[in-house]
Every structure is written in structure tokens, then in C-alpha cells.
Image (cartoon, rainbow, N blue to C red):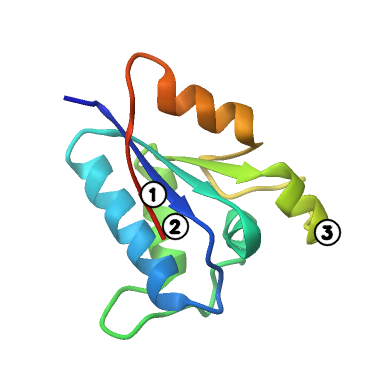
Amino acid sequence: MSTRFLVNLTRGAEDPDRATIAFVVANAALASGKETMVFVSNDAVRFAVPGGADGVHADGLPPLAELVAIFGEEGGALLVCTPCAKVRELDTSELVPGAAMGGGPGLVEFMTAEGAAASVSY
């Protein structure tokens, strides 16, 4: 059984349901003892900078900013697509807890080191 879990998130504030569910699932994976990473690309990279998830709220679910904070506090890894952040001209000098700039190589390493990682995409 895999001890790693990956959530691939490509949706930003324009799709609060998918963005929020991605972090609900990621936090559930952490709570179950899985080494968990959320890979954010496209507009989802905005969630890696402080304030980037503010105001994103899907009906019936906690605010996204709260879920992102819990994920970082509980030891989740947030890997940020470097080219996606550059295209969006994000200031990545400060990131939310648990976040790091990366891209394809970091994603591949996480998914293949010490066995495959289970994954879902949103």
C-alpha cells in the first residue's frame, strides 16, 4: 500500500468547489497518516502566496484559506509550478507554510520515490 498521496490542483478561485474539495481531500489524507503533497499549477498557484486563498469559499465547506492553513500546519507539502507562477507574475518571495517552488522534477520525484503515490486531480 502506498504511503504517499498526491492531489493535483489546476483550478483557482474561478472554481471554488474544486479548489476547496482538493484541500478537503488533502487534509483527509494527512489525517490518515499519508505523506501528502498538493501540486498547484495554472491559476491554483495563487493559493501558495499569503492571502491568495482569501475569499474563496464553496457552499457547505470551510473557507479555502482555512483549509490551506491547516494543510501547512499539519505538515502537508504544497509544490508550486514555477513556470505557472512566473507567467502570472506572482511575488513568490513569501509563500504559505509548507509551500515550495518546484515543478515537474519535484512532482516526478514525489510520485516515484520509494514506490508510487496514489493521486487524484481537481
Where residue 1 appears, as percent x and y from the top left, is 16, 24
Please name the residue that numbered disc 2 is placed on: 68
Q: Amino acid at mark 2?
A: Val
What residue appears at the point 64 percent right and 48 percent down from the top-left corner? 95
What residue appears at the point 44 percent right and 55 percent down from the top-left corner? 69
Please name the residue that numbered disc 3 is placed on: 89
Q: Amino acid at mark 3?
A: Glu
For the residue pair 86 and 1, the one nearer the viewer reads as: 1
What residue appears at the point 83 percent right and 59 percent down from the top-left corner? 89
Q: Earlier in the sequence, mark 2 or mark 3?
A: 2
Q: Earlier in the sequence, mark 1 or mark 3?
A: 1
Evaluate whether residue 21 shows in this view. yes
- Distance from the alpha carbon under mark 2 to that under mark 3: 21 Å
Instruction: For label 1, count other residues whose C-alpha is less than 10 Å away and answer few (under 14), some (14-19) or many (20+).
Output: many
Q: Amino acid at mark 1?
A: Phe
Which residue, as the protein is rendered here, is positioned at the far top? 114
- Distance from the alpha carbon under mark 1 to that under mark 2: 5 Å
Please name the residue that numbered disc 1 is placed on: 71
- Quarter of the image containing the C terminus? bottom left
